[in-house]
Image (cartoon, rainbow, N blue to C red):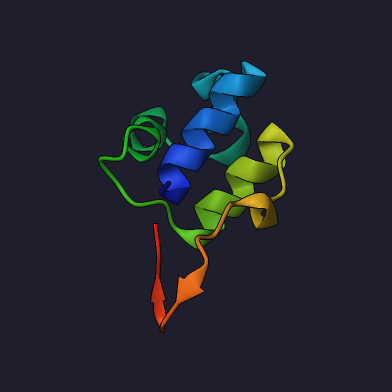
Amino acid sequence: MTPEQWLSKEIKDRGTKQRYIAEKTGIPERKLSAILTGRRRVQADELISICNVVGINPLDYPVPPVVGGKASA
């Protein structure tokens, strides 16, 4: 699961509107939509801002375990 997929799921699960997130973070709605649909990679500062608004901890992102020096999916 990518960070973008994880954010999208968490936002949907909480019922938070993209417009609200865009207003609170200053990220344009179009850019936020591109992030949440996987058309654009989320930047670290954007991830933190979105998480703060939605009320999730960015450290809760499920990082895949590293096996043999490579991340396994």
Q: Is residue 6 left or right of residue 59?
A: left
Residue closest to the eye, 9 or 52 = 9
| Displayed quadrant of residue 36 | top left
Asked if one can make out residue 26 in the rendered structure from this viewpoint, the answer is yes
The residue shown at (37%, 30%) is 33
The number of callouts visible is: 0
- The correct choice, above or below, for 6 with respect to 18 in the image is below
The residue shown at (33%, 30%) is 30
Q: Is residue 29 left or right of residue 40?
A: right
Residue farthest to the bottom, as pictured: 69
- The correct choice, above or below, for 32 with respect to 52 in the image is above
x and y percentages locating residue 9 in the rendered image = 52, 30
x and y percentages locating residue 24 in the rendered image = 63, 33
The residue shown at (45%, 75%) is 67
| Displayed quadrant of residue 37 | top left
- The correct choice, above or below, for 60 with respect to 50 in the image is below
Residue closest to the eye, 73 or 1 = 73
The residue shown at (61%, 47%) is 49
Asked if one can make out residue 27 in the rendered structure from this viewpoint, the answer is no
